[in-house]
C-alpha cells in the first residue's frame, strides 16, 4: 500500500449464493422500524442488494464480489471514482454474498476464501457498520477504502494532491508550485489521536469512524494513511493492517465495527466512537469471530508513581492476538482500559511514546482486573540520569527538534522546512530548536555539537547517549570527538525496512546508542569548545532524503 492505490488481492473463485431471509416485511415488537423509518428494508436489483436505511441513505452491495457499488445520501451519489467501487483492498474476486434482515437490522455477509466481511444497516440511521474478519495471510485484506466521487469534497490539506501536480518521490508524494508538499500519507495523526476521518461541505459530512483497532498492529502511536483527495476523487480508509513502517507482526481475527457515517455537515455522533459504540444489536447476528461486551474484560489501575507530570502517559496492552490502550490521568496516573478480549497481555507504560515500565496482566471475561499503583523505576526513565548536558528530553519522539512537527505532514524537501544543516552550541539556549529532528547520510551527516567541560569533567571518561525512534536503510550514528577519537560503527537495531522519514512517520522501535568516550578524547583547556561530530553511516539507501537516515529522540553526555 505504499505506492499506487492498486493493491491486488489473491484471486480465488467461489460459487455465488444469495439468501434472503426475512425480506423487507415489517416486524412487530421492540425491533420494529419506527414510523419515521417506514421505508427501511432491502431489495434485489439483480446485480446488487439495495438497502434503504429508512433515513436519507440508500446503498448497494454487489451480489458478485461484495463491493459497495452505490452510496446515495439525500439523493446524491457519493460512491466511486475511476470506475472503481468501495471495497476491501482493491476488490475481491467472486464471493459468496448473503443478506439477512432481523427486525431493525439488515446484515450483508461476504465470504471470500478465509476472509469474511460484513455490512450492517440500522433502521433510521445514516450509517453503515462494517466488520472484517481476516483469518490468515491467504488473502491480502489490509484496508477498507471508501471511494468518493470527484468534486464533492475538494480540499487542499496535507493528504490532498489535487493541487500538487509534480511527483517528487515514488508515485505518492507530490509538490505544489509554491513548494509545499502533499501525499496521502500525510495524515498528521497517530491512531490514538483520532476517532474519525472524513470531509464536510458544511451541509454534508462523510466520515469513517475507526474501530478500536484491537486486531490492528503498531499500537496507539502508529501512523498510516487515513484519507486522500485528488482530481480523480477521494478515499477514506480503515486500515486493518499496514506494512509501512510497521513495528509488529500482523494480527488476525475480526476487526470492527467501523462505520461509514453521513451527517448534515457536522462531526459524526460520539456514540459511534471506539470505546463508546454499543452494538448489542449485533450479538445474535452470527458474525464470525464476534465477541459481545459480556465476553470481554477490563483493566483498571489505581495510579502510576514515578511519572514526570510534564508529559502524558499512556498504558498499552498487547499480545499476539490483540492490542488496547488508554490514557493515564494526569493528576495521579489512574487508568481504565475496557472491552478487552480474555487473555494474558504485556502492559506497557509510555512516557510520551517511550516505554518506561512493563508488567504482565491477565484479563477474564466479564471481570475487572484491578492493579495496585504501578511504580516506574527511576532507572527506567533515561531523563533521570545525571547529565553534563542534554539536548531535548527523552520522550520516544523527536518533538521539540527542528522541523519535527512539520515532518508528520510534509516531505523533508518542503519549502516550509528550516535548513537541515547547521551546528549546535551547548549553552546557547537554542540547542534543541537548532538540532534537526532527522539526520541523513546524504543530507546533514557530520553535524557538529560544541560544548565546554570543566577540568574535573575533562579528566574523566563519559558515556554519550543518542536515542532514536526509527531508521531508514539501517542509518545509525557514528561519533567523532575533537577529530581525535572515533567510535566503532554500532550494529543496526531492528527497525522497519520501509520508508518512514519521508512519508510522515518517525515511529519505529525506540533505541538508545551508547558510546564510552575516554578521558583522552577531551580538550584539557576549559576555555575551548569540545567538538562532537555525528555522522550517519550505512551501506544501503540511495541519495538525498532516501539515503540512510534516522530520527532523533534525545542526546546527552552523562556526568
Image: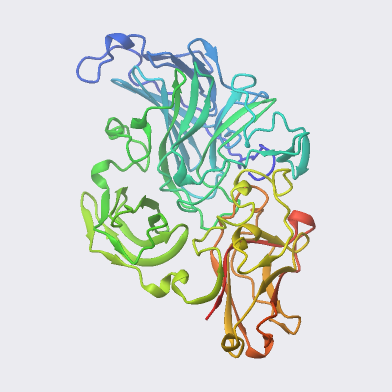
290 relative to 194 in the view: left or right: left
Display coloring: rainbow
Residue 428 shows up from this direction: yes
Residue 437 shows up from this direction: no
Taking depth in this image into account, of 61 and 304 the one nearest to the observer is 304
Question: Which residue is painted at 66% across and 23% down in the image?
Answer: 83
Taking depth in this image into account, of 32 and 37 the one nearest to the observer is 37
486 relative to 37 in the view: left or right: right
519 relative to 533 in the view: left or right: left
Q: Residue 334 location, x and y as percent? A: 28, 55
Q: Residue 139 location, x and y as percent? A: 55, 44
143, above or below 328, in the image: above
Q: Specify the quadrant of the image occupied by residue 24.
A: top left
Question: Which residue is painted at 26% across and 50% down in the image?
Answer: 297
Taking depth in this image into account, of 291 and 393 the one nearest to the observer is 393
Instruction: Pick the quarter of the image with the N terminus.
Output: top right
Q: Specify the quadrant of the image occupied by residue 132.
A: top left
Q: Residue 154 location, x and y as percent? A: 63, 23
Q: Residue 541 location, x and y as percent? A: 75, 61
105, above or below 284, in the image: above
Amino acid at each position: 500500500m505504499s505506492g499506487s492505490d492498486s493493491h491486488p488481492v489473491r484471486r480465488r473463485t467461489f460459487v455465488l449464493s444469495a439468501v434472503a431471509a426475512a425480506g423487507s416485511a415489517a416486524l412487530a415488537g421492540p425491533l420494529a422500524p419506527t414510523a419515521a423509518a417506514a421505508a427501511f428494508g432491502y431489495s434485489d436489483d439483480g446485480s446488487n442488494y439495495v438497502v434503504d436505511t429508512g433515513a436519507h441513505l440508500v446503498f448497494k452491495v454487489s451480489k458478485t464480489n461484495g463491493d459497495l457499488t452505490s452510496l446515495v445520501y439525500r439523493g446524491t451519489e457519493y460512491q466511486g471514482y475511476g470506475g472503481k467501487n468501495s471495497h476491501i483492498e482493491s476488490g475481491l474476486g467472486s464471493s459468496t454474498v448473503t443478506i439477512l434482515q432481523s427486525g431493525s437490522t439488515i446484515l450483508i455477509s461476504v465470504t471470500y476464501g478465509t476472509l469474511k466481511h460484513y455490512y450492517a444497516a440500522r433502521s433510521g440511521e445514516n450509517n453503515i457498520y462494517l466488520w472484517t474478519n481476516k483469518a490468515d495471510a491467504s488473502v491480502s485484506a489490509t484496508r477498507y477504502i471508501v471511494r468518493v466521487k470527484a468534486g464533492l469534497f475538494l480540499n487542499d490539506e496535507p493528504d490532498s494532491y489535487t493541487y500538487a501536480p509534480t511527483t517528487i518521490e515514488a508515485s505518492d508524494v507530490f509538490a505544489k508550485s509554491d513548494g509545499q508538499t502533499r501525499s496521502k500519507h500525510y495524515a498528521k495523526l497517530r491512531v490514538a489521536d483520532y476517532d474519525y476521518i472524513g470531509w464536510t461541505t458544511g451541509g454534508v459530512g462523510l466520515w469513517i469512524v475507526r474501530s478500536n483497532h484491537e486486531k490492528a498492529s503498531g499500537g496507539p502511536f502508529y501512523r498510516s494513511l487515513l484519507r486522500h483527495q485528488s482530481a480523480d476523487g477521494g478515499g477514506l480508509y480503515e486500515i486493518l493492517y499496514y506494512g509501512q513502517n510497521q513495528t509488529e507482526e500482523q494480527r488476525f481475527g475480526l476487526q470492527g465495527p467501523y462505520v461509514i457515517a453521513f451527517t448534515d455537515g457536522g462531526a459524526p455522533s460520539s456514540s459511534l466512537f471506539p470505546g463508546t459504540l454499543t452494538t448489542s444489536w449485533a450479538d445474535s447476528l452470527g458474525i464470525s469471530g464476534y465477541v459481545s461486551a459480556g465476553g470481554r474484560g477490563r483493566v483498571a489501575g489505581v495510579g502510576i508513581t514515578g511519572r514526570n507530570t510534564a508529559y502524558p502517559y499512556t498504558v498499552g496492552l498487547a499480545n499476539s492476538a490483540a492490542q488496547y490502550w488508554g490514557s493515564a490521568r494526569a493528576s495521579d496516573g489512574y487508568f481504565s482500559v475496557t472491552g478487552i478480549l480474555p487473555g494474558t497481555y504485556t502492559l506497557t507504560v509510555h512516557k510520551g511514546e517511550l516505554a518506561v515500565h512493563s508488567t504482565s496482566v491477565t484479563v477474564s471475561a466479564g471481570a475487572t482486573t484491578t492493579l495496585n499503583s504501578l511504580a516506574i523505576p527511576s532507572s527506567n526513565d533515561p531523563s533521570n540520569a545525571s547529565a553534563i548536558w542534554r539536548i531535548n528530553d527523552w520522550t520516544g519522539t523527536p518533538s521539540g527538534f527542528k522541523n519535527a512537527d512539520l515532518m508528520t505532514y510534509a516531505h523533508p524537501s518542503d519549502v516550509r522546512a528550516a535548513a537541515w544543516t547547521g551546528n549546535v552550541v551547548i549553552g546557547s539556549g537554542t540547542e534543541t530548536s537548532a538540532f534537526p529532528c532527522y539526520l541523513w547520510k546524504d543530507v546533514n551527516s557530520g553535524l557538529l555539537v560544541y560544548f565546554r567541560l570543566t577540568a574535573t569533567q575533562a579528566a574523566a571518561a563519559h558515556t554519550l547517549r543518542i536515542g532514536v525512534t526509527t531508521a531508514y536503510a539501517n542509518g545509525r550514528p557514528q561519533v567523532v570527538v575533537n577529530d581525535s577519537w572515533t567510535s566503532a560503527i554500532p550494529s543496526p537495531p531492528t527497525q522497519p525496512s520501509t520508508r518512514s522519514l519521508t512519508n510522515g512517520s518517525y515511529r519505529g522501535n525506540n533505541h538508545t546508542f551508547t558510546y564510552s568516550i575516554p578521558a583522552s578524547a577531551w580538550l584539557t583547556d576549559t576555555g575551548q569548545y569540545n567538538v562532537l561530530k555525528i555522522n550517519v553511516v550505512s551501506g544501503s539507501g540511495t541519495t538525498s532524503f532516501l539515503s540512510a537516515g534516522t530520527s532523533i529522540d534525545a542526546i546527552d553526555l552523562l556526568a
